[in-house]
Image (cartoon, rainbow, N blue to C red):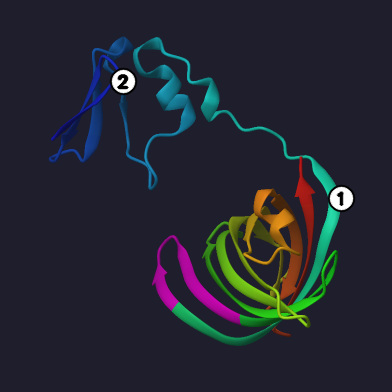
Amino acid sequence: MAHSVGDTQLSHESSEQEQVVQNAPNDIKFRPRFLGLNVEQLNTLGGHFISNMQTTEKTKGELILEVHDKSTTTTVRDISQSGIKLEQNSVSQAKGKLNAQGMSTVSYTLKTDGSNEWEMKGVMSTKEGDFLAVWGGGTGKQTGPTTAEWTGEVHFMSQSPKLSWLNNVTGWVEGSGDNAKGESWGKIYEQK
């Protein structure tokens, strides 16, 4: 099987299970990654530099919400050599620029090196009946046997005129949690 990246051809060699880059400097060989090529490998292909793949530092703006979650269920989705995939459902209390309660589902992978990756989907409603959907993802690390910290990006969607200002906001979240207690705390800032 072959794939093209610009003028460079990628082919899969099933016997060695390596990808070979042909027409690239020195016929570069590399092992495939879980989510594809890393930035260094992409920058090397054919001598092209891909600047939009570089990471940029996130800047925190004004505090939007403080959230306290209490876990209701945890499901083990998978166990492998690379880590454990879990899914956690929680009830949430949020206060700040709006006061709301809701529920969320967080899917996360605890990796063997102590790091984690997470994705979250949730819904909230205010006492006045305004509805808000929230979703996002990020990374984190273990800070103790049952504790962790994380950061990431969240997005909002609401049809409520009172909450419509959140539709154009990207949030930066910083949080911590304790699996033994089944609780987590987070702060969501406007990302600039």
> Few, some or many C-alpha atoms within 10 Å of disc 1 (few <14, some 14-19, many ≥20)?
few
Of the residues tagged 2 and 1, which is closer to the observer?
Answer: 1
Quadrant of image for the N terminus? top left
Q: In percent of the image, x 40 and y 73: which residue is there? A: 78
Quadrant of image for the C terminus? top right
Q: Amino acid at mark 2?
A: Ile
- Quick check: 172 left or right of 138? right
- Quick check: 129 left or right of 52? right
Q: In percent of the image, x 40 and y 63: which residue is there? A: 81
Asked if residue 71 lies in the magenta stretch, the reply is no
Residue 56 found in image quarter: top right
Instruction: Compare marks 2 and 1 and give the one earlier in the sequence.
Output: 2
Q: Which x, y percent locates residue 187?
A: 80, 62
Q: Amino acid at mark 1?
A: Glu
Secondary structure category for the residue under label 2:
loop
Q: CA distance from mark 2 to mark 1?
A: 46 Å
- Quick check: 93 left or right of 131? right
Question: Relative to residue 153, is residue 185 depicted above or below?
Answer: below
Q: Given contact means CB atoms under 8 Å apart, are the residues at marks 2 and 1 in contact?
A: no
Question: Relative to residue 92, is residue 16 depicted above or below?
Answer: above
**Of 166 and 52, which appears nearest the observer?**
166
Residue 139 found in image quarter: bottom right
- Residue beneath disc 1: 62
Q: In percent of the image, x 53 and y 61: which residue is there? A: 112
Of helix, strand and loop, which mostly describes the magenta segment?
Answer: strand
Q: Which x, y percent locates residue 142?
A: 68, 63
Q: Which residues are magenta?
A: 77-89
- Residue beneath disc 2: 28
> Few, some or many C-alpha atoms within 10 Å of disc 2 (few <14, some 14-19, many ≥20)?
some
Q: In percent of the image, x 45 and y 20: which residue is there? A: 43
